[in-house]
Amino acid sequence: MKTPMKFEMLQTMLIVRAFENRVKKLYMEGVIRGTVHLSTGMEGVSVGACMALRPDDYITSTHRGHGHCIAKGVALKPMLAEVLGRATGLCGGRGGTMHLFDVPRGVMGTIGVVGGGIPVATGIGVGIQQLGQSRVVLCFMGDGATNQGAFHEALNLGSTWKLPVLYLIENNLVGDTTPLKEVVNIEDLADRAGAYGIPGVVVDGNDVLAVHRAVEEAASRARGGEGPTLLECKTYRWEGHHLGDPCVYRTREEVDEWRRRCPIKRFAQALIDDQSLTSEALGALEKEAEARLDEAEEYALGSPEPSPDTVLEYV
Amino acid sequence: MKTPMKFEMLQTMLIVRAFENRVKKLYMEGVIRGTVHLSTGMEGVSVGACMALRPDDYITSTHRGHGHCIAKGVALKPMLAEVLGRATGLCGGRGGTMHLFDVPRGVMGTIGVVGGGIPVATGIGVGIQQLGQSRVVLCFMGDGATNQGAFHEALNLGSTWKLPVLYLIENNLVGDTTPLKEVVNIEDLADRAGAYGIPGVVVDGNDVLAVHRAVEEAASRARGGEGPTLLECKTYRWEGHHLGDPCVYRTREEVDEWRRRCPIKRFAQALIDDQSLTSEALGALEKEAEARLDEAEEYALGSPEPSPDTVLEYV
Amino acid sequence: MPSEARNLRRIRCLNMSSEGNVTMKTVTYLEAMREAMDEELARDETVFLLGEDIGPQGGVFGSTRGLLEKYGPRRVRQTPISECAIIGAACGASLVGTRPVAEIMYFDFVAIGMDQIFSQVGKLRYMSNGQMTLPLVIRTQCGGGRGKGPQHSSSTEAWFVHSPGIKVAMPSTPGDVKGLLKTAIRDDAPVLFIENSFLYNTKGEVSEEECLIPFGQADVKREGTDVTIVATSAMVQLALVAAESLKELDISAEVIDPRTLVPLDMDTILRSVAKTNRAVIVHEAFTRCGVGAEIAARLMEEAYDDLDAPVARVGGLEVPMPFAQSLEEQVMPSVTKIVKQARAVCYR
Amino acid sequence: MPSEARNLRRIRCLNMSSEGNVTMKTVTYLEAMREAMDEELARDETVFLLGEDIGPQGGVFGSTRGLLEKYGPRRVRQTPISECAIIGAACGASLVGTRPVAEIMYFDFVAIGMDQIFSQVGKLRYMSNGQMTLPLVIRTQCGGGRGKGPQHSSSTEAWFVHSPGIKVAMPSTPGDVKGLLKTAIRDDAPVLFIENSFLYNTKGEVSEEECLIPFGQADVKREGTDVTIVATSAMVQLALVAAESLKELDISAEVIDPRTLVPLDMDTILRSVAKTNRAVIVHEAFTRCGVGAEIAARLMEEAYDDLDAPVARVGGLEVPMPFAQSLEEQVMPSVTKIVKQARAVCYR
Ligand SMILES: Cc1ncc(C[n+]2csc(CCOP(=O)(O)OP(=O)(O)O)c2C)c(N)n1
Ligand SMILES: Cc1ncc(C[n+]2csc(CCOP(=O)(O)OP(=O)(O)O)c2C)c(N)n1
Ligand SMILES: [Mg+2]
Ligand SMILES: [Mg+2]
């Protein structure tokens, strides 16, 4: 991989991190309604995966989708504005944090129903195949989502029809407050690929380059008409399930241990080690990320709520 | 296995066969409404499986459930009466061929929704575990049913909670008019067990003793608290999907080939070969089966339709 | 086509600027559906079909017979038994430039894909603030009367009328099924298209020329002056028979088929009730909380002063459809029940 | 328990032979639910709970807090995210001698188990000719107003009222939620028990002694003479506020909470309308084909001569619940909308 690309990846990871931190701050300030799920600590997956795609490829995402959207190219201002429910938001305030759509960038929706996006992504794969395009669709899902019936039906269909779909599990070891190991009887979710006769790949989700490589490979398989791949990226979410979660299901030590494995620090260190990056340059990138979030915050806070008159549009 | 038990198995297979043939005759005569799915040719599975259970074990079954019910001990008269929609039927005519219930015999329902019985059976397993009983529940399903989301959710739950459930696939190579190989991308459905960390076993469904052995083993595992097993019994249905099916999806040769592998003939021949049975005794058993069906037919045809006044009972 | 099956009729189609005289032919409801799909597959190559057993067999009822041979396996896609994935696949495919027509074999099984239809199909356009359109059709067939028993006889259209973002069609004649299905396939909104296998072999006229029937336009199946009978799907036939019986009692019944429930053409119903001052609503679905309740409530809200009697409803009893004929007949609406209610609202 | 929270009240409970004076205490809706489950778990060891995140965390809203510690993992079973299997598991377990209480985190997700609830839970007893009983409860919570957005705010109780074989409860106060949940757990029929997380922190009285509230018995939350407001779940509170505003306009409103929708206590509603001659029905669910339509239709059928004005409905707009507050407020019923309709039916 070329160094500029690596820089872009690092910068995107920093922006995702800054975005999540900013959302947290705004939530604590009471500016954001509803339930917010942050992806802090999982930037290796979102950035590694989305940046291995082409601009006209599609993604579907989950309730924890900020990182995916940013990495797929969504502009920060309308995105933050949407999280704040403003008229200038991506979806005019209709969707909020859990339902972000940016069709021109191939973001076909962060879906709030766990597993609900998997059949939809599969259908996007059908559409691509039907039109004879060389696009792919990447379907993000949490580990918990793999226990939904929708997962099973969709993967079976995707595999039978050899659809250009990448099923990517962000396995952060827990679903809401329930540890994965209490709700499945297997070690690696990637093994579920065997039920569909497709490749299942376990990836270190905190290694952005490894994720990138695995997704690139799966995408080229899919473009070649060889059908879907199931990718399991093992990672961790630093924050609670949602902002406000007391996290009864895990220890401080576990969190600290994973914080030490920070995907951003790790990638930056590797770049510093091979002399492509200096600490100063890293500092500058971090500052820039903050500055872009400042702008986005100003934009979002300065935007009006949607006009009540528009409520019946687009049903 | 003791010889009397083998005799009982043979006799039960003959009765199942006679039942299906009788239903076919009655359907052709226009006495039966709706859609009827026969299990002719699949007696090795129904009889091998159910006779490996204890009387107080449970089963759930499918739209193709006549064999399961008979093998689990349901009396022929009320059963045939139910298929004819009579007041004296198992369910007073409310259920018909696709919805047979006989709770005292542990027949917790043939369920017409493909896959719909799998979560229910799993729940019966929960109930058994909850009450600390040593019963098991055997859940019959077709190969086609394994593509339902309900299959996935239920097996995952069954495995996680180590429930005393036997998931048994009657793989007759086709679902309605669609060959299995067109709708899954794997050879053996038993491999789906890997997604749940439970044993998956392929069984020759036309070998009644093999089925019996496999079910006995799985049942003793389940009673021992070791959780579910996924059993795939490969077999074939001689008749169309339902009576009236033109069978566009298969050749005459394929059917003939499988008719040659008749599970009853095979088992009877083995008994004759080892001198436990004579052709005369076999002929007598066949005759007896017919005689019992004559009685059942007379009973059913002589029974009234349910009284319209009862229509609102038991909602 | 025998000549007695052809004639000229004045009909109103969406794609004709005004009413015109067109040549008619007689086909079955099933043939009309197949023609609609055939014509749309031929016209627009982004249209494709998916569903269980729709390939070589042409569907368990035969509605897609011959289409696989004509359009190939990419356009006529036979699926696993996976209703959730079928609806999801149609949903996703519709988002990226194709027009899927999904078949769910029995209406009951739509419940298996209920999350996909309710939370995804019906909501994606709104949630995305109009960024997405979902030109998809979910075809299914409903109803009892054929001894299919409790899990294959449901009519739950009210669930979908009570859900946002989905149009609901429920045609009763070959002409309607053809014209509405073609309109549904061309519509940019998701459509739940509910056929009735009880009607599949019934015959009726369809235009030889292309005729698109608009959504939201009820059809007066019979004119009358004393009582308005609003009926859907197979119940339209019963209502027409009931109207004949009522004639003998000197009651002139007008029979209206809304044809689509979302959008619902209240105007035609209101116009009729303004004339008759009485209404009976008939559907096969459970009476309780059915579409009849909605129409009755709206008549009260919008035609209170026109009504000379409370609006009556004739619907299915609130039980799972029993298998036995003696019980099934008890559950379903009947000509007798319709006549009884029509007489009651006429105080006769 | 502070003393001001205790007092004596005359209440009507299922398990008391007549109305009696009982000591009352004040608890939140959430505490009342927890008490109900706690008491039933203690009373009957065949009762058990299952659902997502109900273990150490005690449910995402806290309704099962402390119960895992008290009753252990066999009685408080934390499940995978598998709504279809949760409902199916409850269904199966209920068939063999246990009394499962399943939790579905949001009402929206009941759609994922829709086949299990509609075709299995609601039908097994009937199909089996009464061989089976299904003493199970499916608890869930509904409603908007909290910025949860389009996929976490639904109120689709009408689907289940339009399905056979399932009882439907929708309590609005701590006293009702406790008494009805206990009744539900002891009922041999399947119950869909719909809470409202918007109400979880509201306070109210519950009896210190055991009190089972019967199904099918509406509660008059406020007496009045000019107009009957029938309201469900969180809408009861709005209706009571609206009633206060109406008082200033010299309109005396009676507020009735049906509490259970199946069975529905029409008698209490009819008695009220016989007095007021006017009715407004309020629910958060979409107006179109909602429970309000059913109640309105029945009022027309059963109280036609009592009505001095058409029954009015106040329900949610037929759109997915938008996230932004300005839009969400527009979609939901409000005091203003209720007052407006109440005035309209009073011609004031
Ligand atoms: C069908 C459904 N059930 C339950 C929920 C509530 N819920 C939201 S997120 C979540 C946990 C999801 O876990 P996972 O898929 O692992 O994603 P993660 O949150 O860990 O990223 C749950 C249970 C939901 N949104 N949808
Ligand atoms: C959910 C559902 N979808 C479709 C059907 C219609 N149908 C009835 S049986 C059947 C085929 C089932 O195949 P399989 O599970 O292999 O059982 P088999 O008939 O081969 O015994 C289908 C599609 C149904 N009853 N339920
Ligand atoms: Mg997770
Ligand atoms: Mg099969």
Image: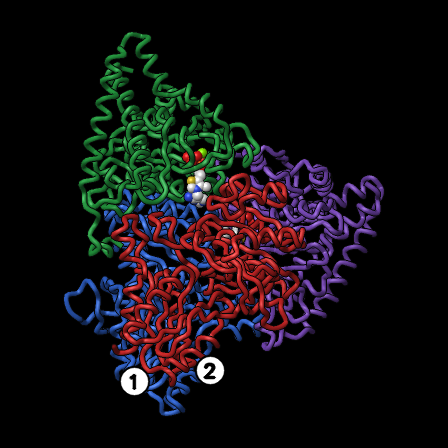
Chain colours: A purple, B green, C red, D blue
Q: Residue D213: x percent and y percent?
A: 25, 65
Number of other residues with Cα within 10 Å of mark 1, as a class: few under 14, some 14 to 19, many 20 or more: many
Q: Residue at x 51, y 59 (%)?
A: C177
Q: Chain of mark 2?
A: D
Quadrant in which the N terminus of chain B appears: top left
Mark 2 or mark 1, whichever is nearer to me: 1
- Quarter where residue B170 is shown: top left
Q: Are marks 2 and 1 on the same chain?
A: yes
Q: Amino acid at mark 2?
A: Thr
Q: Is residue A214 placed above or below D243 in the rendered structure?
A: above
Q: Residue D192: x percent and y percent?
A: 35, 58
Nearer to the camera, C233 or D26: C233
Q: Residue at x 63, y 33 (%)?
A: A199
Q: Chain of mark 1?
A: D
Q: What label does residue D276 carry, if any?
A: 1
Nearer to the camera, D175 or D140: D140
Number of other residues with Cα within 10 Å of mark 2, as a class: few under 14, some 14 to 19, many 20 or more: some
In screen coordinates, is C300 left or right of A77?
A: left
Question: Disc 2 and disc 1: Cα gap in Å?
Answer: 21 Å
Circle 2 residue: D336
Numbered disc 2: secondary structure = helix
Can residue D297 be seen at all in this image of the molecule?
A: yes
Mark with earlier residue (2, 1): 1
Q: Residue furthest front?
A: C3
Q: Is residue A16 placed above or below D251 in the rendered structure?
A: above
Q: Is residue A77 placed above or below B7 in the rendered structure?
A: below
In screen coordinates, is D49 left or right of A252?
A: left
Q: Amino acid at mark 1?
A: Thr
